[in-house]
Image: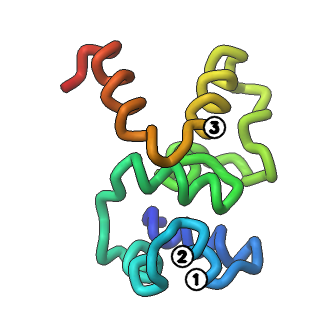
Amino acid sequence: MSIGQRIKQRRKELKMSGEELAKLLGKNRSTVFRYENGEIENLPLDILLPIAKALKTTPQHLMGWDTDEKTENPITNDRVSNNRKKLMEFVQSVPDDQTELMLRVMKSILGDS
């Protein structure tokens, strides 16, 4: 399943329209449908995090890295270490206008350019 398919599936599970998701993201409806239909394949982190937050899931789930069932707060998964839980909670709390800065800081710490 693609990222777009997971976005659409989760949106429908929440009984949310494409227009509602678009409003939450500050995008237009056609952009959301382009995400869902795979026309925009490589979602940048600064949009992936807000989509996950709006859909009450994690970026890991949307990327297909987490095969566990979605919950209202997937961070509570017992198999995730406490430090990873804290890190994911922190990342999800970063305001949209600061995500790019946070990404640069994290890449700098990890030595990734």
Name the secondary structure under disc 2: helix
Marking on residue 22: 2
Q: Are marks 1 and 2 in contact (CB under 8 Å)?
A: yes
- Residue 63 pos. (x, y %): 47, 51
106 displayed left or right of 68: left
Q: Are marks 2 and 3 in contact (CB under 8 Å)?
A: no
Q: Is residue 31 above or below residue 88?
A: below
Q: Is residue 7 above or below residue 51?
A: below
- Say which label, 3 or 1, has the lower sequence index: 1
Given residues 48 and 65, the one toward you in this image is 48
What residue occupies the far left of the structure in this picture?
113
Say which residue appears at 63% left-offset and 53% top-offset: 53
Q: Which residue is mark 1?
A: 18
- Residue 31 pos. (x, y %): 40, 78
Given residues 61 and 72, the one toward you in this image is 72
44 displayed left or right of 56: left
Q: Is residue 97 above or below residue 22?
A: above
Q: Quadrant of residue 113?
A: top left
* Three-letter residue code for mark 2: Ala
* Three-letter residue code for mark 3: Ser
Marking on residue 93: 3
Say which residue appears at 69% left-offset and 47% top-offset: 68
- Say which label, 2 or 3, has the lower sequence index: 2
Q: Quadrant of residue 93?
A: top right
- Residue 105 pos. (x, y %): 35, 22
